């Protein structure tokens, strides 16, 4: 089976489904998107790796794994989303140490969080993209409102594999000034509430674009 390279478009969260996040992966040489419903903690970790301006004062779990791996000369070479069964994605992390390659089973969200930290490429098989890939009519990551397509994905986790439930609040920041948003961002980072920080940073980015 042929492998298809993916890039990370970003993370979209639902305006209507509290605690629901969709990680959006792009087909590098095509137009299809692969949305994967993930939990709040994993969304937070991926958002931190994507957002270079948010620097955690202490390492998150995936940062700790990277530090541990580097200490023992373990390198993550690539991540492969290799299976889709009953709406759940399965992934493998391809690692190397002393020129010996190992394959480690992992949840897709964890695998991608690590791929970001190791600058490792992400792949899936063509048949999985044929089955689960979609064409989005709008770009939910550059719009003030999440697209209907993403909300449809988030409201049907059985189709795309929700990994864990979350009870986060539906707080929005549209009524805050830029100065207030930057102050809230600093407070969120200092309290290590990176999920909140990522949301605030999204709102700031919308204002500055």
Image (spheres, rainbow, N blue to C red):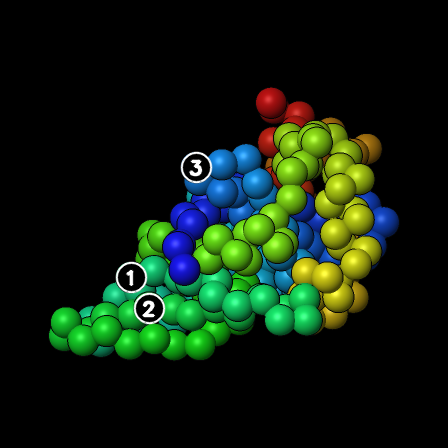
Q: Residues within 10 Å of mark 1 (few under 14, many from 20)?
A: some
Q: Which residue is drawn at the image coordinates 68% and 71% (left, top)?
A: 86
Q: Quadrant of residue 62?
A: bottom left
Distance CA(mark 1)–CA(mark 2): 6 Å
- State how many labels appear: 3
Which circle's residue, 2 or 3, is located before the other in the chain? 3
Image quadrant in which the N terminus is located: bottom left
Disc 1 versus disc 3: distance between alpha carbons? 21 Å
Reply above or below: 192 against 129. Answer: below
Q: Which residue appears at 75% of the width and 37% of the height?
A: 147
Quadrant in which the C terminus appears: top right
Task: Say which of 157 and 60 sits in front.
Answer: 157
First reached walking from the N terminus: tag 1 or tag 3: 3
Percent across and percent down for residue 104 are 38, 77
193 or 78: nearer the viewer: 78
Residue 142, image x, y percentages: 64, 30
Q: Alpha carbon of mark 2 to alpha carbon of mark 3: how far?
A: 22 Å
Q: Which residue is mark 2?
A: 94
Visible residue check, residue 19:
no
Q: Residue 89 lies in what quarter of the image? A: bottom right
Contact (CB < 8 A) between labels 1 and 2? yes
Q: Which mark is residue 29?
A: 3
Residue placed under numbered mark 1 in the picture = 77
């Amino acid at each position: 089976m042929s492998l298809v390279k993916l890039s990370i478009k970003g993370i979209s969260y639902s305006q209507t489904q509290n605690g629901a996040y969709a990680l959006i992966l792009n087909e590098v040489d095509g137009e299809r998107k692969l949305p994967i419903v993930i939990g709040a903690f994993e969304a937070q970790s991926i958002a931190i790796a994507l957002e270079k301006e948010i620097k955690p004062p202490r390492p998150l779990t995936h940062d700790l794994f990277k530090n541990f791996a580097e200490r023992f000369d373990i390198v993550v070479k690539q991540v492969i989303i290799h299976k889709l069964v009953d709406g759940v994605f399965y992934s493998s992390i391809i690692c190397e140490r002393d020129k010996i390659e190992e394959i480690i089973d992992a949840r897709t969200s964890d695998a991608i969080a690590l791929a970001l930290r190791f600058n490792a490429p992400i792949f899936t098989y063509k048949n999985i993209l044929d089955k689960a890939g979609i064409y989005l009519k709008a770009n939910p990551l550059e719009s003030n409102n999440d697209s209907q397509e993403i909300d449809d994905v988030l409201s049907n986790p059985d189709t795309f594999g929700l990994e864990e439930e979350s009870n986060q609040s539906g707080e929005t920041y549209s009524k805050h000034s830029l100065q207030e948003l930057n102050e809230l961002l600093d407070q969120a980072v200092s309290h290590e509430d990176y999920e909140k920080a990522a949301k605030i940073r999204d709102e700031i980015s919308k204002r500055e674009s």
